[in-house]
Each structure stands twice: as structure tokens, then as C-alpha cells.
Image (cartoon, rainbow, N blue to C red):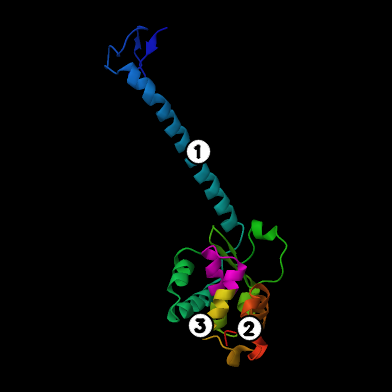
Amino acid sequence: MNKKCPNCKLVNYANAEACARCGLHFIESESVAPRRRLIKRAFICLIVTILVLGGFYASLVFSAKALSYDERNAAVGAIAVLEAKGFSDEVFLLRNVAVFRGNDNWLNASVEKENAFAATNFPFEIVTLYPDFFMYPVDDIERAAILLHEAKHLQGKDEKEAYEFVWRNKKQLGWNKEQYKSSVIWQAVRTQTREYSPNLFVCDANHFGDCTE
């Protein structure tokens, strides 16, 4: 059998140790070639994976509508409240990483769920703001409370961690019982937080057993 040089493609004699044209040593070439093929295959797999994930992400984004001008302003106002209250990590994600949409993408629409104010697709960092997000909050502080919850999902936190973080930090946010106890958002979040983190509601001396009071 003849030896074809992988470098210059010259066909050499079968017993040749090096290519007569370019001088490539065949023993070295034979040891390097499998590694090159492995690297090439790994690179192709990486490119294919990136393309598939990119297509999936694009399908999530473009299967849902963008926020309207007024909706966008409402979200921006709520994020500004979080910034003013010192939630810098969450603000960074909401401003620079999250993509906001105004209704369900195809993946969210395929999952049965209860009425919600917002939803997050992690790790794709897509935040969906439903009509209730704009309708029921009393002001930007309550919308900020909802976005603070979603920001924890952007970090990969589950529902328990998100509800507990918001409830423990409601004082820093300026979201208090005296002003908001009658609001739909306050009552809904308190109920859900008690369901996910009952350990926060075992202080009988406080209203609703709330240990964070």
C-alpha cells in the first residue's frame, strides 16, 4: 500500500518514513491525526448545539409579542424602584439580560397554569408580563415586588426561594402591611409565600403569624 501525505497529498512509497515533497514524518502524522479528528468532531458538535439552542431561543422570543410602549414604561418604572432600593444584582439582570414579552410563547402556552402576574423561562432569561401585572398593582412598588420575584428566577432560584426572598426584603423595598394590606398583590403574594415558606408564618404574636413583621 502506498502512503498518501495528509499535508501535501503526495503519494509516497509504502515504506517511506517521511514525505518526499514536504518532509512530513508519517509516524508523527499518524499520532496527531486522531486528535485532530476528535477536535474537529467536538467543534462541529459545539456549533450544532449552539445553532439548535439559538433556534429554540429565537422561537420562544418571536412566538410572543413584545411589550407595548406603555407596558415597557411600567416595567422600566418598576426596575427604577428596585435600583433606588438597592437591589443592584437583580436590576442588572432585568436591564441587561432579561427579554420582556407581553404574552405566552409557545412553550408557556403548552403548560397549564393558574392566573399569574409574570413568568420566567430559565435559563433563556425571558420574562413574560401578563395583563394582571399592569392591572392589579397599586403602584410601581408593587410591580417592583413582582419583578424582584422574577429576578430570582433569572438567577435560577425556585418558587420557594423567590417568594421567601421577596417577603424577607419587603421592608427594604418599601412594601408594607400598613399601606398595602388591602391590595390584590399583597394578599396574593402573602398567601403564596405562606404556602411555599410556612416557616415564615409561625409567630402567633404578629398579624397573620408573619415572623418578618
Marks 1,2: beta carbons within 8 A: no
Mark before the other along the chain sequence, 2 or 3: 3
Q: Residue at x 52, y 69 (%)?
A: 151
Quarter of the picture containing the N terminus is top left
56 with respect to 18 (left or right): right
**Residue 94 on image: x %, y %:** 49, 68
Residue type beneath disc 3: Leu
Residue density around tag 3, few if under 14, some if 14–19, many if 20 or more, within 10 Å: many
Q: Is residue 5 magenta?
A: no
Marks 2,3: beta carbons within 8 A: no
* Distance Cα–Cα, label 1 vs label 2: 48 Å
Q: Which mark is residue 186?
A: 2
> From the viewer's perspective, is residue 176 above or below residue 104?
below
Mark before the other along the chain sequence, 1 or 2: 1
Location of mark 1 (residue): 45
8 with respect to 46 (left or right): left
* Distance Cα–Cα, label 2 vs label 3: 13 Å
Which of the 4 quarters of the picture holds residue 67?
bottom right
- The answer to whether residue 182 shows anywhere in this view is no
Residue type beneath disc 1: Cys
Quarter of the picture containing the C terminus is bottom right
The overriding secondary structure of the stretch rendered in magenta is helix
**What is the magenta range?**
148-163
Q: Residue at x 43, y 81 (%)?
A: 84
Q: Which mark is residue 137?
A: none
Which of the 4 quarters of the picture holds residue 33?
top left
